[in-house]
Amino acid sequence: MAVDPIENLHLSFLQDVLPVGMAVVERARQGGAGKVVEVFTSTSEPLDALRIEGEPSARLFRDRLDKISPGLGNPVVSVDVAVETTTPQSSETFDHTSLMDCLDRIQFDMKELEHLILNDSSEQSISKSEKF
């Protein structure tokens, strides 16, 4: 979480208090005070139940706040990122000579491939001209 106490309060309000409040308001609108009291008598964790119940409404409210001012409804939370750089340990290290040998083999194989492709395409063009 954020280090700033005001940011902590803002974030806590938007993530915890707002969904519970939205669920309480919706329950009161649907069935009055009896519907609100019902959640406190029917479940062992009423605040968690209300938080889950009110989350969709709270999400819409936060999105509307973001349209007014970006970050107001869904605040940006600062995080600390640590990157540990390690170099892979290779059991086999190449010296300059072996690297050059490898590159020469690759170049030779590329020339052979190019030669085969060119010969194949020229043979196809000859066979097409023989048909006509």
Image: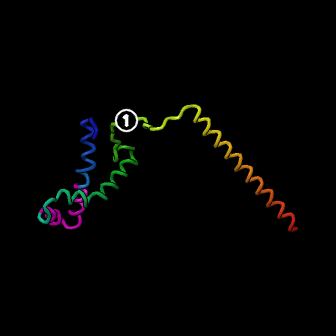
Location of residue 106 (image quadrant):
top right
x, y percent for residue 79: 33, 39
Q: Amino acid at mark 1?
A: Glu
x, y percent for residue 7: 28, 39
Q: Quadrant of the N terminus?
A: top left
Q: Tell me what residue is drawn at x 84 percent, y 60 percent.
A: 126
Q: Main secondary structure of the magenta part?
A: helix
Placement of 80 over or under 35, stated as above or below: above
In magenta segment, residue 24:
yes
x, y percent for residue 70: 39, 44
Q: Tell me what residue is drawn at x 59 percent, y 32 percent.
A: 97
Task: Report crowding for label 1: few under 14, some 14 to 19, many 20 or more residues within 10 A (C-alpha).
Answer: few
Please state if 32 lies on the left or on the right of 107 as rendered.
left
In the picture as drawn, the residue positioned furthest to the top comes out as: 96
Q: Quadrant of the C terminus?
A: bottom right
Look at the numbered disc 1 and give the secondary structure of its residue: loop
Q: Nearer the viewer, residue 62 or 68?
A: 62
Please state if 71 lies on the left or on the right of 104 as rendered.
left
Q: Nearer the viewer, residue 104 or 77?
A: 104
Pointer 1 residue? 84
Q: Which residues are magenta?
A: 20-40
